[in-house]
Structures are given as structure tokens and as C-alpha cells.
Image: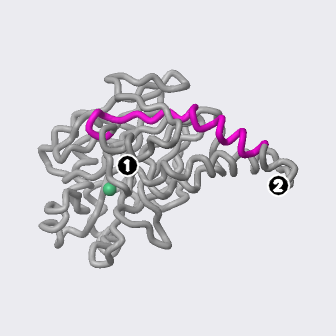
Amino acid sequence: MKLILLGTGGFLPTDSAQTACYFLPEVGVMLDAGSGSFHLPKYLQRPELDIFLSHAHGDHTSGLTYLFASYLKADWLRRGETLGADNIADFVHRANEALPRTRIHADENTLAFVKPIYAYLPYQWHPLQAQEPLPGGGMLTHFLMDGGTIGFRLDWPGHSLAYITDVVARPDSAYIEKIKGVDLLLHDCNGPDHLSDLTDHIGHSHLSAVLQIAASAQVKRLVLIHSSPIEPLDYSADFESARPLFPAAEIGYDGMELDF
Ligand SMILES: [Zn+2]
């Protein structure tokens, strides 16, 4: 199973990192829809798209505005036709037909904030179910974390993934049990250890705490996401010295492709 990191930044897009968006092309599943969703056209394979939102913040949802143009561009890339006055109406028509096939899944709190903002678009809105079947015999489950964000776990026979964002990683975090043993963990990491007071305060995680979570949950591989656009919070200089806490760790970047 392939996962593409479309946006690995948090808060604000930068030249190097768009905001939160992660895509599984084979099953048409998107985890959060931040500004990174503009990369979708080159990866879109299926006619239907299921988007699961962790919470309502704009860095996780602003990309919902780009889907019409994403569908149009994906269609154009697939067809390889020259675009002109004679066929643009057909492209627009097909993009408009794709919009209502977009299913957005979120908890009631998130739906209450986000749905009114995008009410002008014909998306399908679905309250998150305890078990969400996925193409390929998979299942998505979710859990509420401290701070109010939803964490996700996706399991297929032989492949598993967990997505944890916008949370303070603590040694006793209840979600550790939920992500036990996954093949791939994407986890919020928002700053170096010496700024842990600050990352705690803003509801995010610092480097060594995340590595310790991955070790306690006995995941196979960890990719750090939701980097900060504010330079003092760049933890990359500390990464190699902290890595012995969980050696199978990497820093995620936009465009990274992961097989799990
Ligand atoms: Zn965020």
C-alpha cells in the first residue's frame, strides 16, 4: 500500500511544506485536506474520494476549496487532450460531476464548523462511524485524543497505518494502545525538546516525546509530520542525536512516497 505525503507542514504553508494532507491513491483515501491537497491531481486514480478530517482547523481543511480544480486537472492529465474553447465545457462538466462523489467524514464537532463553510459545494458529509470499511478489505477506526483532535488507524490484511496530529505526546497518552504495532505511524512533531514548554502550550509534540511514543507503541516505522513554519521550532538539527530512542524514524517531507 502506498501513501503520498501531499502536505507535511502545520499552521501555514511555506515554500517547502504545504499544510496537512496525506493520500492513499490505491484506495482513494485522503487524511486531512490542508493546502497540500493541490498536489492531488497527479495522484488521483479512482473516481471516488473519501476524506477523513482530524479536526476543523484551516491547516487541515482549507484544501476542500480546491477540489473542483483538482478534479478538472486530474481529468486533463489523464486524457492528455489539448484544452481549448471547444472542450473546456466538457472538462467543467466532468469536474462538476465528480464533486458530489466526494465523501467527507468527520466527527460532529468538526462537521458543525466545516460543513457551513463549504455548503456552496455539493460534497457528501458523513458523521464518522466507529468502523469505516475501506476498499481492498480495509477498515478505518478512530479515537478522540486529549485536545479534541481525532486520531485514525487504518488496517488492511498485512498493512496498517496510524495518523496522529495536533496532540501533545505524553508517556501515558491513551492513544498509544490504539496505534499498537502499526506498520507506519505518522505523528505530529512540532519542535525541539528544549522548547517542549511551548509545544505543550500550543497542543503539539516535541521530538523525543514522539520517538518514545513510537517505541512504546512498538510501531514498525515512524514519520514525523506537521512541521512548524516558525524557524526556532525546527528540530532537524537534534534529530540524529535523538534518533536512538526510535531508530526507524524519518522526517516527512512533501512529495515523500511511503510503502507500507
Ligand atoms: Zn494543525
145 lies above or below 36: above
Rendered residue at 49%/70% (across/down): 16
Mark in front: 1 vs 2: 2
Residue receiving disc 2: 83
For mark 1, does the 10 Å Cα neighbourhood hold few (<14), some (14 to 19), or many (20 or more) residues?
Answer: many
Q: Callout 1, which amino acid?
A: Leu
Q: Callout 2, which amino acid?
A: Leu
For mark 2, does the 10 Å Cα neighbourhood hold few (<14), some (14 to 19), or many (20 or more) residues?
Answer: few
Judged left or right of residue 236, residue 25 is: right
In space, the residues marked 1 and 2 are separated at their CA atoms by: 38 Å
Rendered residue at 23%/37% (across/down): 144
208 lies above or below 97: below
The rendered magenta stretch, by its main secondary structure, is classed as helix
Where is ligand 1, by quadrant? bottom left
Please give the range of residues in magenta.
90-110
7 lies above or below 98: below
